[in-house]
């Protein structure tokens, strides 16, 4: 399967928009590190009493989990953009088969075909 230039461009626009959304979401509670694509959740100091400290720790734990999830998504999107640039986008990284166009349009970051994805599950 060869993606048309129009499809490829549309998918690239979708991926760039998703990358921007993820980076914006991450910036709300985390700071970029020196490593591209990695963030560090901020620890907000609310106050000094015991209840405030408990709230701070709970909020930080929630933010840390969210940060890891969003970083994972950002890594997938960045990987898809890199595959677009190097000409391997749309090819399954596991078996080398074409990834179904419907899958790519539904999930532009897809790096595996449905056959390989089902083998993992």
Image: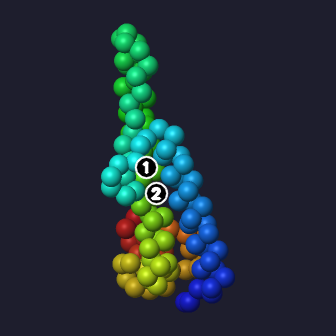
User: Mark 2, residues whose alpha carbon is within 10 Å: few (<14), some, or many (≥20)?
Assistant: some
Dot 2 and dot 1 residues touching (CB under 8 Å): yes
The residue that appears at 43% across and 41% down in the rendered structure is 30
Residue located 41% across and 15% down the image: 47
Quadrant of the rendered image containing residue 83: bottom left
Visible residue check, residue 65: no
Of residues 91 and 84, the one nearer the viewer is: 84
Q: Position of residue 15 (x, y in %)?
A: 56, 66
Tell me the residue at 55%/69% (across/down). 108
Distance of label 2 from label 1 (alpha carbons)? 6 Å
Residue 113: numbered disc: none
Question: Residue 58, position in %: x, y?
Answer: 40, 27
The structure's colour scheme is rainbow
Query: Can residue 16 be seen in the rendering of this structure?
Result: yes
State the image coordinates of residue 77 (x, y, percent, origin top left). 48, 64
Q: Is 53 above or below relative to 77?
A: above
In the visual, does 13 lie left or right of 36?
Answer: right
Most extreme residue toward the top is: 49
Where disc 1 sits, the SS reads helix
Q: Residue furthest left?
A: 35
Closer-to-camera residue (101/43): 43
Mark 1: few/some/many CA within 10 Å (<14, 14-19, 20+): few
User: Is 35 above or below relative to 121?
Assistant: above
**Which mark is drawn over residue 73?**
2
Q: Which residue corresponds to mark 1?
A: 69
Residue in the foreground of this view, choosing between 10 and 106: 10
State the image coordinates of residue 121 (x, y, percent, origin top left).
Answer: 40, 64
Tell me if residue 39 comes above or below residue 43 in the rendering. below
Q: Secondary structure at mark 2?
A: helix
Q: Quadrant of the N terminus?
A: bottom right
Q: Residue at x 33, y 55 (%)?
A: 35
Quarter-wise, where is residue 37 in the image?
bottom left
């Amino acid at each position: 399967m060869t993606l048309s230039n129009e499809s490829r461009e549309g998918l690239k626009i979708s991926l760039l928009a998703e990358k921007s959304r993820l980076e914006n979401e991450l910036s709300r509670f985390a700071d970029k590190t020196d490593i591209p694509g990695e963030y560090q959740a901020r620890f907000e100091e609310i106050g000094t009493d015991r209840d405030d400290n408990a709230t701070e720790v709970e909020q930080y734990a929630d933010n840390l989990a969210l940060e890891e999830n969003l970083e994972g998504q950002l890594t997938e999107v960045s990987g898809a953009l890199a595959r677009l640039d190097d000409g391997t986008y749309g090819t399954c990284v596991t078996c080398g088969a074409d990834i179904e166009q419907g899958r790519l349009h539904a999930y532009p970051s897809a790096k595996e075909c449905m056959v390989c994805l089902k083998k993992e599950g």
